[in-house]
Image (cartoon, coloured by chain):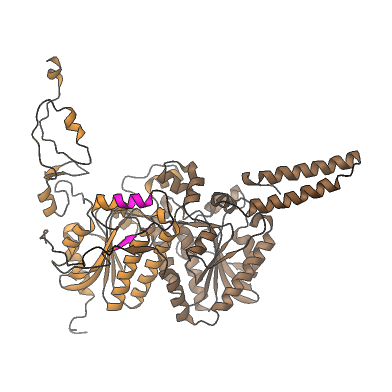
Amino acid sequence: MAGELPFEMPLVEMRKKIDELKQFGIEKQIDFSDEIARLEERYEQLEQEIYNNISPSQKMHLARHQQRPTSLDLIHLIFTDFIELHGDRLFGDDLAIVGGLARLNGQPVTVIGQQRGKDTKDNIARFFGSPHPEGFRKALRLMKQAEKFGRPIITFIDTKGAYPGSTAEERGQSEAIARNLADMSMLGVPIICVVIGEGGSGGALALGVGNRVLMLEHAIYSAISPNGAASILWKDASKADQAAEAMKITAKDLLEMEVIEEIVPEPLGGAHRNYEKTAEAIKESIIRHLSDLSSMGADELRVDRYMKFRKIGKYTFERTVQPEQPIDAPDMGK
Amino acid sequence: MLKDLFQKKRKYATIPSERLGRNDHVQEGDRPRREIPEGLMSKCSKCGTIQYSKELEKNLKVCPNCGHHMRLNAMERIRMTLDEGSFQEFDSDMISVDPLGFPGYATKLEQQKLKSGLREAVITGEGTIDGHPVVVAVMSFDFFTGSMGSVVGEKITRAIEKATEKRLPMIIFSTSGGARMQESILSLMQMAKTSAALARHSEQGQLYISVITDPTTGGVSASFAMLGDIIIAEPSAVFGFAGRIVIEQTIRQKLPEDFQTAEFNLQHGQLDLVVHRKEMRSTLAKFLDLHTDHEKEGF
């Protein structure tokens, strides 16, 4: 398979050697089967070694892999009868977010996700998966529609972040994201969010206020992209790898911090190696979590979602201080 | 000496300032110059007008010459806004930890405390404005560029929950550079936490006024700052989601001077009104009064 990342090169080279040896054996009619078997065994060891020790920055590159399955790829594999719906009814239709109706194991659901492009042309049309306000507003419209008809909501998160352009600002990027956060928290139907690639900043979170947040094994999720953090911290965006290591962006980190509920395993080498297997694992997990939530009424679901986010955060108290006193206010032009 | 002939004679007094560094005048120090005590005078960061600090403070830190609203820290804002002696602080001793073990974060937190005299980027509590009880959260840009980490999110959420529980209006004065990246995902989640708390406060029919002050960007602008029933900004306050430099890089164009200012945002329908600092307290009082049940007359 093409598109190997630098950390996979030892495997590529070894595979090449094995293939060469096989070819040589055929040409010269020499039996190398013992050697080949030994090499294959070594290859498998190396494969395990490499793929079981993928570093955060390597995961970042996997999460951004051009061949990684997008929201639409997974939607078509996980659901049946998907019908895409368009537009926010206010301004336009943002192709960086797709959404619509579908069936999951026969049950009607609403499914929404950020959509990266498959090639350059597609990427330009979809703003590289970075939504404008109208995208977030379309998503919220579809979520409220789901609530009206009592359908569960599934969202797929895959964006570098909200589109940072002047048109987005003029149309209220901040308001659109903020509104999604507040209104999603109040929806009376189950919401399952799956981070499938890169979860970047507020643009990701705007589809991320779910009862359960799941994450693919090599997906990443952070407040700012590692590139952005590197350019602010070290004035050098090329130090993204370094930032990725420091920022605790992996699924494992987020599970430990109780930001997500579950890690969905990927095929060896990453989701792009096998779309079907990836989709199958996600589907199994979504169905399991939805059936967990199925006994909850609308209010219980709201409380469950509120409590999930309410408990996130780490802080302490400086107990050495004196008990607080009212501040004596000098007259300042009142 | 010939050199003296060409030396520029200063016709004005110079103000020593920590920001400029004291070395500037020490180097030229052949002649003793008239020293003005530190902090006696202040200079407008926009038009450069110099005036007595006391006068400036009486003018609520608004430049009398150009009307520029200088940044305030949380305590100054509370003094200007709430009734004297009415403020009771919540969670004053809550402080940040270094949850990710992020390089340099712990040291930076200590530096920020010393620099600003604050424990964190927000102060929360309750008090009254013109007799109307209210819960407030006031951010300070002084502390870590007002960035929102776990403590800012938790303090604001607790304050909103208190307002919900006591059925009180909520006012938040925002100023922030965005999420605190040293707490990465935990910072990001504070956006959801505070917004969800406001949704509950709103559902109960309570009033929330968001006051946007210079500058408010990123994670704060895309959460509680934009969720007010009423959204007010101070004149010229810059507010938006993405920063100017990032946008200019994205669209490869220079942005207009007034881009993302309060006036720009008013024009684009993102705000209810722009209010001068002198009118802020009375405007808030008016809104609070309009949302108070008085004896009903007529209808």
Using residue A263 as the reference point, say whether residue B18 is left or right of it.
left
Taking the view exactly as shown, the residue that stands out farthest to the right is: A29
Taking the view exactly as shown, the residue that stands out farthest to the front is: A320
Residue B226 can be seen, yes or no: no
Percent of width and height locating residue B40: 11, 45
Q: Quadrant of the C terminus of chain B?
A: bottom left
Q: Residue B119's image quarter?
A: bottom left
Instruction: Give the vertical position of A45 relative to A187 (above or below).
Output: above
Percent of width and height locating residue A289: 57, 74
Q: Residue A264's image quarter?
A: bottom right
Percent of width and height locating residue B24: 20, 32
Q: Which residues are magenta?
A: B94-111
Percent of width and height locating residue A313: 40, 64
Q: Nearer the viewer, residue B253 or B170?
A: B170
Taking the view exactly as shown, the residue that stands out farthest to the top is: B2
Using residue A216 as the reference point, say whether residue A301 is left or right of it.
left
Using residue A325 as the reference point, say whether residue A131 is left or right of it.
right
Query: Residue A39 in magenta?
Result: no
Instruction: Give the vertical position of A15 relative to B6 (above or below).
Output: below
Residue in view at x 23 percent, y 63 percent = A321
Q: Nearer the viewer, residue A79 or B183?
A: B183
- Colour of chain A, in one word, is brown
Query: Residue B105 in magenta?
Result: yes
Tally of numbered discs: 0
Using residue B122 as the reference point, say whether residue B127 is left or right of it.
left
Residue in view at x 28 percent, y 67 percent = B91
Q: Quadrant of the N terminus of chain B?
A: top left
- Colour of chain B, in one word, is orange
Residue in view at x 20 percent, y 70 percent = B127
